[in-house]
Image: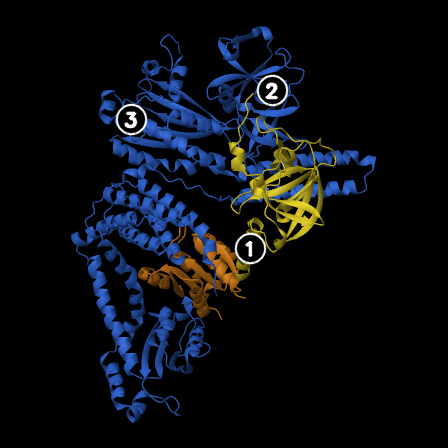
Chain colours: A blue, B yellow, C orange
Amino acid sequence: MSIDMSQFHQVFFEECFEGLEAMEAGLLNLNIDDIDPEVINTIFRGAHSIKGGSGTFGFNNVADFTHIMETLLDEMRDGRRQVTQIAINILLGSVDCLREMISSIQNEEEVDESRVAQHTADLDNELNGLAESTPPPSHKANVETIITETSELVSNTSEASDTNEETGWKIAFCPYLDLLKTGNDPVRMFRELSELGELTSLANIQDVASLFEMDPEECNISWDLKVMGDIPLDEIEEIFNWVEGDCELDIQPIATKPAKKTAPPISEVAPEDEPEEAIETLAKEASQPTQPEIIVEQPEISKEIEPIAKPPTTATKEPNKKIQLDSDQSKLIVQVASSIRVDTSKIDALINMVGEVVITQSMLGLVGENFTMDKVDQLKKGLAQLERHTRDLQQSVMNVRMLPISFVFSRFPRLVHDISSKLGKKIELKLVGENTEIDKSVVELINDPLVHLIRNSLDHGIEMPANRIAAGKPETGTIELKAYHRGGHIVIEIIDDGHGMDRNKLIAKAVEKGIIDDTTVLTDKQAYELIFLPGFSTAEKLTDISGRGVGMDVVRRNIEALGGNIEISSELGHGTTIAIHLPLTLAILDGQSVAVGDETYIVPLVSIIESINITEKMLNKVAGKGETFRLRNQYIPIIRMHKIFNVQPSTKSKMGEGVIVVAEGQGVLCGLFVDDLLGQQQVVIKSLEANYRRVDGVSGATILGDGSVALILDVPGLVRFSNR
Amino acid sequence: MNKNVTQEFEKKDNDHDRFSNKIDNAGQYLSFTLGKEEYGVDILRVQEIRSWEPVSRIPNVPPYEKGVVNLRGSIVPIIDLRERFKLKSADYTLLTVVVVLQIGDIKKTRTMGVVVDSVSDVITVDKAQIQSAPDFGTKISNEFINGLVSVNERMVMLLDVDKLLKLEELDQTEISVF
Amino acid sequence: MASILAVDDSASMRKMVTFTLKSAGYDVEEAVDGVDALEKAQSKQFDCIITDVNMPNKDGITLIKDLRAIANYKFTPMLTLTTESGMEKKMEGKAAGATGWIVKPFDPDQLLKTLKKVLG
């Protein structure tokens, strides 16, 4: 049978990445002073499963690599090896390496062999460190002994089969009473034997008790078997492989053709035809009563030998390579899963909903078939029901896409571990609300901004241990990563207890960079917001931790692209809190429909501050800079939608007749001048780019109740666009 | 399981046919008219034919990109071929037809609608009959034309739909602001 | 056709085993760990159990022990999926009452061949 194994690859890859994450989390959780065996076991299991799968699916390089990890972990698990921080770091490095290997395989790219070789060497060094320091036979030595042993055995067998032209085997098979209780069945074994050659069996039933005393669950028959034919010994042994230890077994070659005699004892037949051979056989029988045991074990040993022998060979390639943590370890590989796992209860809910919809639909069908006016009430009732079910169904489908935010959070302990040790800071990461659910697409896109923000906190927020002690704070700093739901949104907070932000420093910096002039009066909040401006960096010097050229402005833009916003609060000397508000899903948004000419546009409700009417008199025209109006104490630029979108204006082109929708985008307020407000509704977001392309000032499209298409406005995009 | 594999192969073959630019020995084309001229598109690229319906305008795009419509839940752009070819534009009537085409390659397909005057026929074209397009002085640039074929004394221009609706080109099109 | 319960915490291995067995005409059910398997084995009689050894919640060895204690599974063939380095595990499995083992990595043909050993 040929089965296309590649159909299982995708599942296998996903499983690997999950396993690697579990291993990583386990390794980070290990406290070397107080080892939790269950944690070690979890890490071991990760390596073990990846090894098993990769071997089966033909990724031998992965299997070889994980084999070394597994061996190391196995020794730790059995307590044969001390768990050290160095070993943990090596294993963490290997996890990264493995992740890259699997990613490369998945993307059909070249595996970075040199990196693999380096990590292999690291692992081997760690593994062999044990061999030198402890009494049990070294890994290498072990292998050598096995090699010699096996080669002897192998040569024995080959010799036996070469010199003897035996044409059959004589097997004395005496099962112990409990053999049947392992599920093995002599009858099935005999059937297999008979497939190898002509089988004659003679049962000894002298031990069988009388019918009344007999225990049918015990096996008290023994057999003398003969199987004739040119059969390799290992094929016979394989059949009895599973009952080793559950029986007495003696397998001897029959040296001659039995001619026409039925089942003659060897000693009788042998002298007639080939005396020398027979004597040899007899001698063997006499001098090696334990031989069957050795023979039976042999296939095991030869199977063992290959994988054990491999690690040392790879190890010799770069034996003196120093153990080191890669500097790029903080570079997390983000695996965007292309499929999701869904809780069965969610699927069940979905199926229930569909059932309800089908029932309602058939009910409506009946009403419609012979419709008379007196059925109007029934029809209305059915439609109301359909509406309710559709809403529920939509809810359930949305639920399927929800993932716990732990998918993102779980990467951060590693990040914090690596960076804090690099910076020489002591930092504890607290994760709160990891089970808060969020749409899969948001999960995928929120990772990078969070990484950036946490790096910032690690680098600029938390002080060096000495400084902390001097400031009367605990030596270990804390970063709390917290997720919770609040009114249709998910809030993610990054709270550190570092030194906070100094508003005067921020303002001084902004003045120095010419971003603001020194007469500008800013509130605390506005001062903190300065860090979101392009080209603003508060660190005295750029470090490789957070200063990678990607600024906070990019972070904010990414979050706003997700339909969210970001806020900062800080207290000098006590720490900073960054809060990100995100929509639960990217598939649906609450929108305000607005009319411009004949067109309908949707403004995301989240960006709307208020809607007001103003008159032409309230406008300030700034030469060359468009129009603004004063709202409370702020001047807000006006974007005339019909102008910017080139729409034939309706009669309401005069300021007093239309409506100003005050909206916020990227921290900037603007007034969108539209003809009219139409209504608020939830809209399903459709991609314009799937068949078309990105359009400036538009974030997507939706389908209205009448089937027509309405564009969803991208407020930050409009602000940028209008400034051009 | 072998069956699955075969099906997979068949599917690939189909995709290949669909997207190969070469014209097989005999190919079928859907012909339609723009003014007095007749054009043909590879019938394998035609998804459906619809009547014209009002579109939602897209701001600041070339005038031949009429807008987008809802095609069973997908947002699909509509292109006016007369305007694309710089022919005299015609009024849209109830008889105006939109041909929905699949463009792109195996990796990524897109759906687009093109507005034409009317659909005339399905023609079977022998590869040998196809002549390369000379610069025959129509207003249409040669880049969209795969070849010419003569059917019942009529000349039909075979369009290269991928070039016709190339998105990279769309992306580069200058956008007039205000 | 014989019914088989395939137990493995790894979805890819489980799928592979199930797919192979189903293509060979066996009736297959899956369980994700020992606990799940024990539950399923009690609600339906299987003719053979194939189980991974190292699994969370309940490992394969314990599963076999538990199953052997049930009258209906006293003589049912039970095979462990084990790695080549797991000689101890093989013996441990046998001590718990496993019929035999299939050594990982294996290909579909090996799996079917081995299964033939225990299924009539």
Q: Identify the disc placed on residue A542.
A: 3
Left or right side of A674 for C34:
left
Residue A241 position (above or below residue A489):
below
Left or right side of A519 for B39:
right
The percent coordinates of residue A197 (x first, y second) are 41, 80
The percent coordinates of residue A443 (x first, y second) are 46, 36
Front label number (3 vs 1) = 1
Q: Are marks 3 and 2 in contact (CB under 8 Å)?
A: no
Give the residue furthest to the bottom: A272
Q: Amino acid at mark 3?
A: Leu
Q: Chain of mark 2?
A: A
SS for callout 2? helix
Q: Identify the disc placed on residue C28.
A: none
Measure how far apart labels 3 and 1 are at the Cα level.
Answer: 55 Å
SS for callout 3? loop
Measure how far apart labels 2 and 1 are at the Cα level.
Answer: 49 Å
Q: Nearer the viewer, residue A342 or A333?
A: A333
Residue A220's image quarter?
bottom left
Image quarter where the C terminus of chain B lies is: top right
Measure how far apart labels 3 and 2 are at the Cα level.
Answer: 45 Å
Q: Chain of mark 3?
A: A
Q: Chain of mark 1?
A: B
Q: Nearer the viewer, residue A18 or A380?
A: A18
SS for callout 1? helix
Q: Identify the disc placed on residue A642.
A: 2
- Whether residue A168 is visible to the viewer of this picture, yes or no, is yes
Q: Amino acid at mark 1?
A: Asp
Q: Earlier in the sequence, mark 3 or mark 2?
A: 3
The percent coordinates of residue C68 (x first, y second) are 43, 62
Left or right side of A104 for B83:
right
Residue at numbered disc 1: B13
Q: Residues within 10 Å of mark 3 (few under 14, many from 20)?
A: few
